[in-house]
Amino acid sequence: SSRPTLSLSALLKQYGIRLTANQAYHQMVKLGIVEQRERYSRTGINNIKKFWSLTAKGCMFGKNITSPANPRETQPHFFESRFPELLKLLDTVH
């Protein structure tokens, strides 16, 4: 998709939302929008590195891009046009 996307932290900052990306990701897990995945790592805790990935449901709000830090990880990027809708959903999570 060629729709403009941004990282979660950039969008939270742009909208003035006082939530860290990590807090927002944990709320999105409850909504089924993202999941935490794991890969083998020589340096991670117990040789495991965790990273976030959009689920099939989450792909209506963004796309998984290859992480610049590691080609074996994804990094969710969110469509700027759908972010207000996602914020409304996050408001419903407690």
Image: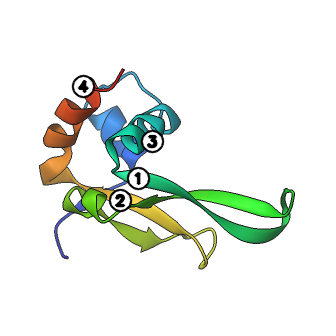
Kindly report the distance in space between the C-alpha atoms of the residues bearing marks 2 and 4: 21 Å
Question: Mark 2 vs mark 4: which is more N-terminal?
Answer: 2
Q: What amino acid type is highlighted by mark number 3?
A: Tyr
Question: Mark 1 vs mark 3: which is more N-terminal?
Answer: 3
Q: Which residue is mark 2?
A: 77
Question: Mark 1 vs mark 4: which is more N-terminal?
Answer: 1
Against 7, residue 85 (above or below) is above
Say whether marks 3 and 2 touch (CB < 8 Å): no
Kindly report the distance in space between the C-alpha atoms of the residues bearing marks 2 and 1: 11 Å
Say whether marks 2 and 4 touch (CB < 8 Å): no
Question: Mark 4 vs mark 3: which is more N-terminal?
Answer: 3
Classify residue 50 by image quadrant.
Answer: bottom right
Q: Which residue is mark 3?
A: 25
Question: Mark 3 vs mark 2: which is more N-terminal?
Answer: 3
Instruction: Decide which of 41, 3 is in the foreground and name it.
Output: 41
Classify residue 64 by image quadrant.
Answer: bottom left
Kindly report the distance in space between the C-alpha atoms of the residues bearing marks 1 and 3: 7 Å
Q: Which residue is mark 4?
A: 92
Q: What amino acid type is highlighted by mark number 2?
A: His
Say whether marks 1 and 4 touch (CB < 8 Å): no
Neighbour tally class for label 1: few under 14, some 14-19, many 20 plus, Cα within 10 Å? many
Where does the C terminus fall, quadrant-wise? top left
Position of 48 with respect to 15 (left or right) is right
Q: What amino acid type is highlighted by mark number 1?
A: Val
Instruction: Decide which of 45, 7 is in the foreground and name it.
Output: 45
As drawn, the label of residue 34 is: 1
Position of 22 with respect to 14 (left or right) is right
Question: Mark 2 vs mark 1: which is more N-terminal?
Answer: 1
